[in-house]
Amino acid sequence: MSVVAAIRGGSVNFPLFLHVLGAMLLVGTLLLAAAALVLSWRRQWATLGLTRLGLRALPMGVLPAYVLMRIGAQWTESREQLPEPVVDATWLTIGYITADGGAVLILVMVVLAVLGLRKLRAGGGSRLAAAAGAISTLLLAVYVVTIWAMSTKPD
Amino acid sequence: MAASACEHSRYARAVSLYDWLLFLHVLSAFFVVGALTALWGLVVATRPSAPLLAEQEARGFGRIVGPLVGVGMIGTLGFGIGLAIDSSRYHPWDGWIVAALVLWAIAGWAGGEAGKRFDRDPVGGRPAGMRFQALSSAAVLVILVLMIWKPGA
């Protein structure tokens, strides 16, 4: 990131700020969802409040943070005018795959959360919450790899 | 073509010590902002008008997420200083780095005070706790601005 920072123009700073802030909020809201759902699972889903918190964090926190991160990424790339070898570089490919693959998983989690919140009212929904918790934990691990790729920029 | 290869080498090359330090520094920053975001989620989930969590649940959640802020703060400082020493472009005494260090200290102090207020009295200490957490979050946000713009670098 700092290698790019050293050679990037000033017009890239604001889109890059939005991208990094969005990515940090995305990780934060995923952490909120994962921690609440894992804690609730460890207590045999007896703590309804934690389950609700974890499920609500997905559409209300994770989704908007993802949109901010992705818009920031595209805006940054358009301002950077990266040369073709860089566009094809491994680190950028990892970024695209985890961002776009992550979008699919986030949409799945949002659906699970909406259905889970409905079923919670009727006393069910723990399986949907477990699935959402597992996916959010998986995504957190994937985004650690993405942070590595985006900051070290390997060949 | 040579220019293109040069451009490429500026972006993609073998991973060095500097890169590893940068990764750990950035990962630590993600820990800080991530944990602060999760703690704000906790603040919203415990608002007196419509509490989502019982006190015991909130404490359990806070005990897991709270220490992550501290781990991230120590990581950003340690790896950040390592970066400034390892890099020939930046030095620990550069203005924007000194400003970030001062803000880091303010963020750490305010975050610690917020934790104490919430822990001591979750109801009565809530307004003060939220003020300290807002100060800590604002300081972290300004640090992020400094890290992106690097004024004077």
Image: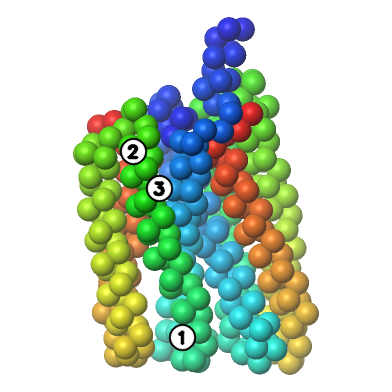
Mark 1 sits on what residue? B59
Q: Amino acid at mark 1?
A: Arg
Label 3 SS: helix
Percent position of residue A60, x then y: 57, 68
Residue B35 on image: x %, y %: 46, 66
Dot placed on the residue nearer the N-terminal end, 3 or 2: 3
Q: Chain of mark 3?
A: B
Q: Which residue is mark 3?
A: B79
Q: Is residue B108 visible?
A: yes
- Way the structure is coloured: rainbow
**Front tag of 1 and 3:** 3
Mark 2 and mark 1 on one chain: yes
B11 vs B97: above or below? above
Q: Chain of mark 2?
A: B
Location of residue A67 with respect to A155 vertically, above or below: below
Which type of secondary structure does the marked residue at label 1 adopt? helix
Q: Residue at x 74, y 83 (%)?
A: A126
Circles 2 and 1: CB atoms closer than 8 Å: no
In the image, residue A1 lies at what x, y percent? 48, 36
Label 2 environment density (alpha carbons within 10 Å; few <14, some 14–19, many ≥20): some
The residue type indicated by label 2 comes to Ala
